[in-house]
Image: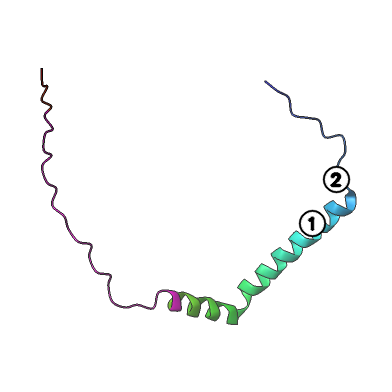
C-alpha cells in the first residue's frame, strides 16, 4: 500500500490566522442575519413566493401493465 507523502512544509501562520478570521466573520454574518427580526419576514416571503400555488398538483397518468409477450425462436435446419 503506498504511503502518503509527509507534509514537511506547514501552512504559514498568517494563512491560518486569516482563514480563522474569515470563518468567524462568516459565522457572525449568518448569525446576525438570522437573528434579525426583519430577516425572518424576508425568509417567510421568499418561501411563500417559491410555493405560491394553492392548487394541488395534477395526479400522474395511470398506465396498466400489459402482460409480457414471450419471444419464440424458430430454427431453420
Above or below, comparing residue 55 to residue 71 in the picture = below
* Residue 31: quarter of image: bottom right
Find residue 28 and name its label.
none
Residue 9 drawn in magenta = no
The image shows residue 65 at horizontal and vertical percentages of 14, 48
Find residue 11 and name its label.
2
Q: Which residues are magenta?
A: 49-72
| Of 2 and 53, the residue lying toward us | 2
| Of 77 and 11, the residue lying toward us | 77
Marks 2 and 1 in Cβ contact (< 8 Å): no
Above or below, comparing residue 44 to residue 63 in the picture = below
Above or below, comparing residue 18 to residue 48 in the picture = above
Above or below, comparing residue 19 to residue 49 in the picture = above
Q: Residue at x 13, y 39 (%)?
A: 68
If you read the primary sequence from the N terminus, does the residue marked by circle 2 or circle 1 appear first?
2
Find residue 20 and name its label.
1
Q: Residues within 10 Å of mark 2 (few under 14, many from 20)?
A: few
Q: Nearer the viewer, mark 2 or mark 1?
A: 2
The image shows residue 1 at horizontal and vertical percentages of 67, 20
| Of 32 and 52, the residue lying toward us | 52
The image shows residue 7 at horizontal and vertical percentages of 82, 35
Mark 1, secondary structure of its residue:
helix
Task: Tell me the quadrant of the picture where the C terminus can be found.
Answer: top left
In this image, 42 relative to 75: left or right? Answer: right
Q: Residue at x 71, y 65 (%)?
A: 26
Label 2 and label 1: CA atoms lie apart by 13 Å
Amino acid at each position: 500500500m503506498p504511503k502518503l507523502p509527509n507534509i514537511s512544509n506547514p501552512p504559514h501562520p498568517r494563512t491560518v490566522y486569516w482563514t480563522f478570521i474569515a470563518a468567524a466573520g462568516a459565522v457572525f454574518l449568518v448569525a446576525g442575519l438570522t437573528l434579525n427580526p426583519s430577516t425572518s419576514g424576508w425568509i417567510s416571503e421568499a418561501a411563500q413566493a417559491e410555493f405560491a400555488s394553492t392548487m394541488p398538483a395534477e395526479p400522474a397518468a395511470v398506465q396498466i401493465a400489459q402482460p409480457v409477450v414471450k419471444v419464440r425462436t424458430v430454427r431453420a435446419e
